[in-house]
Image (cartoon, helix red, strand yellow):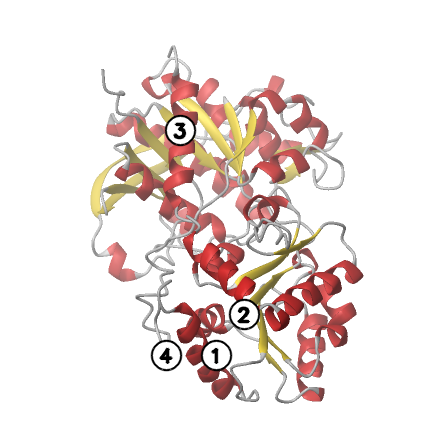
Amino acid sequence: MPDKKLNIAFIGSECYPFVKTGGLGDVMYALPRALTRLGCGVRVLMPMYNCIPQKFKDGMTYRGSFMMDQCQDGRQFYVGIMETELDGVIYDFIDNKEFFDWGNPYTGLWEDIPKYCYFSKAALAALNYLEWIPDVVHCHDWQAGLVPVYLRTRFAGTPIGAARSVLTIHNLRFQGICGIQHLKYWSGLPDYLFDYPVFKQNEDEANMFKGGLAYADRVTTVSETYAREIQTGFYGEGLDGHLYYHRAKLSGIVNGIDVEQWDSAADKLLVAPYDASNVLQAKRENKRALQDQLGLEIDDGKFVIGLISRLTDQKGLDLVNAVFPELLDENTQIVILGTGDPRYEGAFRYYESVNKGQVCAFISYNEALAHRIYASSDALLVPSLFEPCGLTQLIAMRYGTVPVVRETGGLKDTVAPYDITTDGGNGFTFDRYEAGLLSDAVHRARDVYTNDRPAWDRMVLRDMAKDVSWTVSAEKYLDLYREVTEGK
């Protein structure tokens, strides 16, 4: 007998191309599309933010509306449903001008707590209203953290109450922590949930994510290593004990990337698009073009290191800053693209000023330049303090650029260290968070590039052959959905 078709509802606070502020928006777009190709029925529910571009609003259809009680005192709010479809995925937007008609998606925690309490409950109510009952509700990050709790409490006994819940942690640093009374009022949930096993954080505060993690049928995060790391004090952001307690239902599935968006053979932003058959020659052409564009010495024999990142401590930039002069020699160039902490912006501008022709610090974000750096660099530096999954190393490999990474989270799961004895591996790694080890990893990479170019070129081809698409990850999620719905 063929497998039963599964229906999956995705609930989250952002989704490309409608609204995107980070990696969550990419996952909410790419994973549903991949699951649709595997035969699942998929709907994505997200807020109807005013900042959604008008061209998308113009293509939406009104599906209905109703009033919903929300707060502790029974206060009611309007719930409208606007709908559109892209690539076989149905998108339902929860419409309420009081919550979503002003500002950016995330405006401040005091305002965001009511907004996402309302959204979590309204998304489930909308599924009941539409009479589309999924097998699994897959919710994402703290903004949808109340969904598993509502599912088992306020919606128990309704059609949607039969669904199973999966909650994915994209970044545990953000949890939706607020005053207990604030969350009690806006969630309308019963008092017994506001104890330590569920919402209670301390005597005065509640944690939305903590409650969702307790009530979800399964908890995933975006790499196997990060799933282990967050059960420890260093990475657990205060929830390590809670996650260790719930470890039996916690697993990691590494993200993929959109291989249509990131395709070196079809990338019109490159001077010389390429695939594995002509990568070695084309990367030299792209490198010369990038050097010319950025004012670097034009020499396709230079070892070019790219760094594309938010300029924050999390991304390991304190290590880079500490050893920057050691990373340079007469055969090395470094290109930096990103914005963030002013101290890093200033430091990289300084290094550019004293190393003209060797260093370019482009303190901005430029999508076209990002593509060109991925294609033109020989190595990409990702020395993160922690990295739940990481996408830059996956894009780099897709473009035949060798990653140099710290062994944490998804970086450890996706980059195998180069082994000179077996001629294996697809990058260069270091384990402890130390500046000297970062410098050593860069020196090892440069040594292979300079002194054993055939080995380097084979590594480039291994990277390009690696499957970094969503297909493998989607199949793992499908296995998880089947497991969680067994016996349902």
Q: Secondary structure at mark 1?
A: helix
> Disc 3 marks which amino acid?
Val
Q: Position of residue 262 (x, y in %)?
A: 38, 60
Q: Nearer the viewer, mark 3 or mark 2?
A: 2
Mark identifier at residue 287: 1
**Residue that badge 4 annotates:** 271
Nearest to viewer (mark 3 / mark 1):
1
Measured along the vertical axis of the image, is residue 167 above or below residue 60?
A: above
Tell me if label 1 and label 4 are in contact, CB under 8 Å.
Answer: no
Which labelled disc corresponds to residue 270?
none
Tell me whether circle 4 and circle 3 mark residues in contact (CB < 8 Å).
Answer: no
Residue found 76% across the figure and 58% down from its top: 437
Return the x and y of residue 336 as percentages of the image width and height.
Answer: 59, 73
Residue topped by disc 2: 378
Quadrant of residue 233 in the image? Answer: top right
Q: Earlier in the sequence, mark 4 or mark 3?
A: 3
Pick the front one: 204 or 139: 139
Report how far apart the C-alphas of labels 3 and 1 lie in the structure.
Answer: 46 Å
Q: Are marks 2 and 1 in contact (CB under 8 Å)?
A: yes
Label 4: few (<14), some (14–19) or many (≥20) C-alpha neighbours in 10 Å? some
- Residue 479 coordinates in the image, percent (x, y): 40, 26
Chain-order first, disc 2 or disc 1: 1
Real-space CA distance between mark 4 and mark 3, rounded to the nearest whole angstrom:
44 Å
Residue drawn at the location 48% of the way across and 88% of the way down: 292
Q: Amino acid at mark 1?
A: Lys
Q: CA distance from mark 2 to mark 4?
A: 16 Å
Q: Disc 3 to disc 2, how far (Cα)?
A: 42 Å
The amino acid sitting under disc 2 is: Asp
Residue beneath disc 3: 137
